[in-house]
Image (cartoon, rainbow, N blue to C red):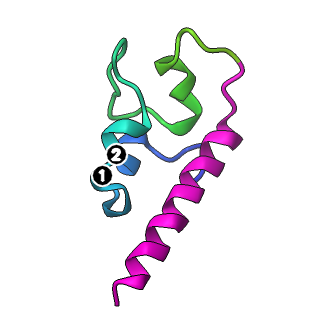
Amino acid sequence: MNESSKVNDILKNPLFKGIGQFLFPADFYSITNNMTLKDVDYLLPYHSHIEVSTTLEVLEYLEKQKQKRDMKKF
């Protein structure tokens, strides 16, 4: 993942199955097919200082946690 990753690709990632719809708010604005992580601040009109690097850190953390849980099943 990087700042050019498409939000819809992240939402469809099997690692985020069951939680994908909670990762990015779409209450005010729709997530478009071309929206990337660097555009996420558009979804959060009442927040300032949205940092792509922080968004990436959180997504990578969630991805690693999910992978750890999946590995414990084997």
Q: In the rendered view of the protein, which quadrant contains the N terminus? A: bottom right
Question: What amino acid does circle 2 point to?
Answer: Gly
Badge 2 local density, few (<14 within 10 Å), some, or many (20+)? Answer: some
Q: Residue at x 61, y 14 (%)?
A: 47
- Left or right: residue 39 versus residue 31 is right
Q: Position of residue 8 (x, y in %)?
A: 35, 42
Q: Position of residue 51 (x, y in %)?
A: 69, 32
Mark 2: which secondary structure? helix
Q: Position of residue 58 (x, y in %)?
A: 60, 48
Up-down relation of residue 4 to residue 49 (above or below): below
Q: Which of the 4 image quadrants contains residue 27?
A: top left
- Left or right: residue 38 versus residue 19 is right
Foreground mark, 2 or 1, reads 2
Mark 1: which secondary structure? helix
Q: Residue at x 72, y 21 (%)?
A: 49
Up-down relation of residue 68 to residue 12 (above or below): below
Q: Main secondary structure of the magenta part?
A: helix
Discs 2, 1 touching: Cβ within 8 Å: yes
Name the residue tied to disc 2.
20
| Range shown magenta | 49-74
Name the residue tied to disc 1.
12
- Left or right: residue 2 versus residue 65 is right
Of residues 35 and 19, the one nearer the viewer is 19
- Judged from this view, the residue extending furthest toward the bottom is 74
Q: Position of residue 4 (x, y in %)?
A: 55, 44
Question: What amino acid does circle 1 point to?
Answer: Lys
Q: Residue at x 43, y 73 (%)?
A: 69
> Could you say which disc has been placed on residue 30 in the image?
none
Q: In the rendered view of the protein, which quadrant contains the C terminus? A: bottom left
